[in-house]
Every structure is written in C-alpha cells, then in structure tokens.
Image (tube, helix red, strand yellow):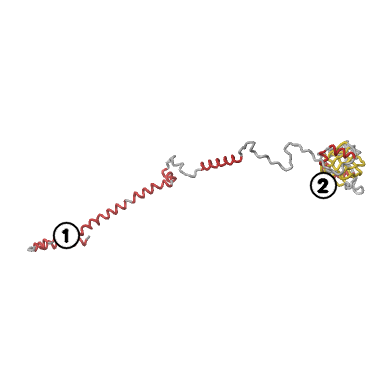
C-alpha cells in the first residue's frame, strides 16, 4: 500500500511540474494515460480491504453450527438435560428402553406357557394308563396266597394247620423233615422264652410285638451261676439257668420283665420247612409257628391250638 501511494505522489508532482514549465500542452495531455495506471492497482485495493470483512463473516458462521450441535446433545443423553434444568418432565421419564416392566411381563407369560404345557388336562379317552409295577397288585386289591406244590406234605397235626391256612403255607414253603428233641418254655410279663435242645441248642425269645430272636444257649452248670440273686417283686419269679443267663445278658430280653411261671419241660416234635418250622409243645398244648426272615436268627411267630 505504501509503494502505491509513493508512485501516485511522484506522478502528481511530475504532472504539476510539467504544467508549471508551460509550452508543452501535449505532454500535459498525456498525463491521464499515465494516471490511468493506478486505476488497475485500485481495484485489488478495494478487494483487499473487503476481504477481512468477509473473513469475519465466515468466522461468525460456525457459531450457530456449534449451537445446533449442543442443542442436539440432549436428544442423545436426555438424563443430562434433566439434571441441568432440574425440571421433572413426565414425558422424558419413560424414554429408557431397558425398563424391567416388559421383562417381568415376558417372564410371567413364559411361566404361564410352561405351566399350561405341563398341566394340560386331556380328555379321559386320551389319558394314558397309569404305570404299574411288575407283579404289584392294584391299590386295595387282595392277592391270594400262592400255595407251594410240594413233593411230600407235612406230617401229623402239622398237615392240618398247613392245609387250613394258605397264607401260612406260602410263608413257610415246603416241608423238609421232622425232628424230635427236649424242650422247655417260660412265660414272662411281656413275652415267652423257649428252649430247644437242638442241635443246635438255642433259646428263642418271643416278644409280644410278634417278632422273635434266637440266642445261642451257652449256659454251663459247672461255670455259670444258676441265678443272679436279684429278689423279684411279689408274685413274680427270676428266670434261672439258661433262661436267666440270656435274661441278664441282653437288655432287650431283660425288658420283657420278670417271669410269671416256672419253667415247663417236655419232649417236642418239630416240622422243619424251607422258611421256618412248626414246634409242638405238649406242656403248653399248642403249636408254635416260627417264620424266619434272617437266616433263622429272627422272624415272626404265632401260636396255633393243636397237637402233633
């Protein structure tokens, strides 16, 4: 800009000098041609002075653009907008898409569908038959006992008891043989004790629960005392010898109480079966039936009025 102003001043001075010298009008007339040079240089001067104005206009243009971006930000994160303004707008509250209400509704609907699939009631003609265990009778039904077919029947009075009670016959099985031996019995307050000479020599304790237990008779007169020396209550007796040893040794036998009667001895006959035996005690006038279920060590018992 300074260079252009100097050139203008020089041209003006030259023009003034020439006019002052006089006598040369033609030279003065050519001055406009030289003065026309600034006209070419004046045009960019106007553009240059207007250029910063236009640049200022451009710098103001991005300002509203940033304002628009800030205004668009709350639409992406509505929670920040609510926090700054602190205005609880009810329309913005349900905007989050991960609310638990639809999930719970879906879970409840799924549970109902599963329940319906399991608890669907079919018509009676389409219901499958209830499964039954192989060999198990229907509930409440009575299964007749299966009487075994034996090569030889029981002997004597045992045959009568055996044939008259099919249930007892199915429990005992087929007879195996007949034996005879010395025996003794004693009645206690809550059961009975039976001694059988065997072999093997054993004492059978008949509990009043309908169960019996067999104990080995280990009484030895040369070693074991015949009595424990305990005075029984009035009207009762203390078991002695083999019965007394078992009575004092085993708590469950002692729990049967004191003896009500003296020992009664005799000669017994027994019919041996596959799963037990029938023993006739003449001193008691009855048959004792023993049905074993533990290798002969225990089982159930019952008495039948009769003889061999």
| Residue under numbered circle 2 | 295
Residue 247 seen anywhere in this rendered image of the structure = no
- Residue 124, quarter of picture: top right
Q: Residues within 10 Å of mark 1 (few under 14, many from 20)?
A: few
Name the foreground residue: 150 vs 207. 150
Image height of 143 relative to 64, above or below: above
Q: Secondary structure at mark 2?
A: loop
Q: Residues within 10 Å of mark 2 (few under 14, many from 20)?
A: few
Q: Which quarter of the figure is the C terminus placed in?
A: top right
How many numbered discs? 2
Q: Secondary structure at mark 1?
A: loop
Q: Left or right: 117 with respect to 187?
A: left
Q: Which quarter of the figure is the N terminus placed in?
A: bottom left
Measured as percent of width and height from the top left, residue 292 is found at 82, 44
Q: Are marks 1 and 2 in contact (CB under 8 Å)?
A: no
Residue 50 seen anywhere in this rendered image of the structure = yes
| Residue under numbered circle 1 | 36
Measured as percent of width and height from the top left, residue 63 is found at 34, 50
- Residue 196, quarter of picture: top right
Name the foreground residue: 140 vs 65. 140
**Mark sitting earlier along the chain (1/2):** 1
Measured as percent of width and height from the top left, residue 145 is found at 79, 39
Name the foreground residue: 151 vs 278. 151
What residue appears at the point 78 percent right and 38 percent down from the top-left corner? 144
Image height of 41 relative to 127, above or below: below
Gap between marks 1 and 2 measured at Cα = 145 Å
What residue appears at the point 35 percent right and 50 percent down from the top-left corner? 65
Measured as percent of width and height from the top left, residue 102 is found at 51, 42
């Amino acid at each position: 800009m300074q260079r252009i102003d100097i050139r203008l001043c020089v041209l003006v001075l030259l023009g003034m000098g020439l006019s002052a010298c006089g006598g040369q009008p033609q030279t003065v007339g050519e001055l406009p041609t030289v003065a026309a040079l600034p006209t070419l240089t004046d045009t960019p001067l106007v553009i240059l002075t207007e250029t910063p104005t236009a640049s200022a206009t451009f710098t103001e243009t991005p300002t509203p653009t940033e304002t628009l971006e800030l205004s668009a930000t709350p639409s992406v994160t509505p929670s920040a907008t609510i926090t700054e303004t602190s205005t609880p707008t009810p329309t913005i509250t349900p905007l989050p898409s991960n609310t638990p209400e639809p999930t719970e509704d879906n879970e409840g609907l799924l549970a109902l569908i599963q329940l319906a699939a399991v608890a669907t009631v079919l018509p009676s003609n389409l219901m499958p038959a209830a499964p039954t265990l192989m060999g198990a009778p229907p509930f409440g039904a009575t299964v007749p006992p299966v009487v075994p077919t034996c090569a030889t029947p029981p002997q004597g009075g045992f045959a009568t008891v055996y044939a008259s009670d099919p249930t007892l016959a199915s429990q005992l099985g087929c007879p195996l043989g007949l034996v005879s031996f010395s025996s003794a019995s004693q009645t206690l307050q809550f059961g009975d004790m039976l001694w059988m000479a065997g072999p093997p020599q054993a004492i059978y304790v008949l509990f009043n629960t309908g169960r019996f237990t067999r104990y080995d008779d280990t009484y030895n007169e040369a070693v074991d005392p015949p009595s424990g020396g305990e005075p029984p209550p009035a009207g009762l007796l203390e078991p002695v010898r083999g019965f007394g040893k078992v009575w004092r040794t085993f708590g469950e036998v002692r729990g049967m109480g004191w003896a009500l009667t003296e020992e009664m001895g005799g000669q017994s006959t027994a019919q041996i079966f596959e799963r037990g035996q029938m023993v006739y005690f003449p001193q008691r006038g009855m048959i004792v039936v023993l049905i074993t279920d533990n290798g002969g060590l225990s089982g159930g018992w019952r008495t039948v009025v009769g003889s061999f």
